[in-house]
Amino acid sequence: MRRMVAAGLAATLAMGVVPDALAHRGSFPDPRDTPGGIDVRRARVRSAEGDVIVKVATHDELPGYGWLYVAFDSRGGPRRDRVAVVQWDTASGGWVERTLYGKGREVVGTVHAAMGEDALRVRFPRTWLRATKHVRWRVRTAFGYASGIVDHAPDVGWF
């Protein structure tokens, strides 16, 4: 029996997926605390059809340009293992960047991004996380010259 359990766990880890790896999924509110920036109202992560879906709703309408960063710790270390970077600029035609990076700015893949009036959605295959532990995550938005106005959700730590 132990061998069967060990073999199943080894096969799961070899595939890079921990069952129910997105243990910290859910919908989390964030206070209005970033005047003049892209102020996160609610951050949500969920799994669907083998994908990770992150939705970030803002207190106000999204501006014509800005950045969204979603960091993931999928290996249980002190730092992020993956970060999704979404940059948009409607004046120059829409999406500037939609990339999931690994450590050292290694490109993992191009994420699907969608924008509404006051929300951004990012979607990519869950296997890209290569999770070996429960996945922690956090959101950061940036707006302004040199991305000077920043909001974090949660304000400190991880979801």
Image (spheres, rainbow, N blue to C red):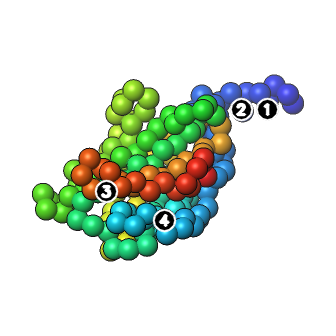
- Distance of label 2 from label 3 (alpha carbons): 43 Å
Nearer the camera: disc 1 or disc 4: 4
- Helix, strand or loop at mark 2: helix
- Distance of label 3 from label 4 (alpha carbons): 14 Å
Which residue does the image show at 39% across and 26% down from the upper left? 104
Q: What kind of residue is marked 3?
A: Phe
Nearer the camera: disc 3 or disc 4: 4
Q: What kind of residue is marked 4?
A: Asp
Numbered mark located on residue 5 in the image:
1
- Distance of label 4 from label 2 (alpha carbons): 43 Å
Numbered mark located on residue 143 in the image:
3
Which residue does the image show at 18% across and 63% down from the upper left? 90
- Distance of label 1 from label 2 (alpha carbons): 6 Å
Q: What kind of residue is marked 2?
A: Leu
Q: Counting other residues with Cα less than 10 Å from the Cα at mark 2, is it few (<14), some (14-19), or many (20 or more)?
A: some
The answer to whether 33 is drawn above or below residue 82 in the figure is below
Q: Counting other residues with Cα less than 10 Å from the Cα at mark 3, is it few (<14), some (14-19), or many (20 or more)?
A: many
Which residue does the image show at 32% across and 51% down from the upper left? 148
Q: Identify residue for label 2.
A: 9
Q: Counting other residues with Cα less than 10 Å from the Cα at mark 1, is it few (<14), some (14-19), or many (20 or more)?
A: few
Judging depth in this view, the residue of 125 and 46 nearest the camera is: 46
- Helix, strand or loop at mark 4: loop
* Discs 1, 4 touching: Cβ within 8 Å: no
Where is residue 66, by image quadrant?
bottom left
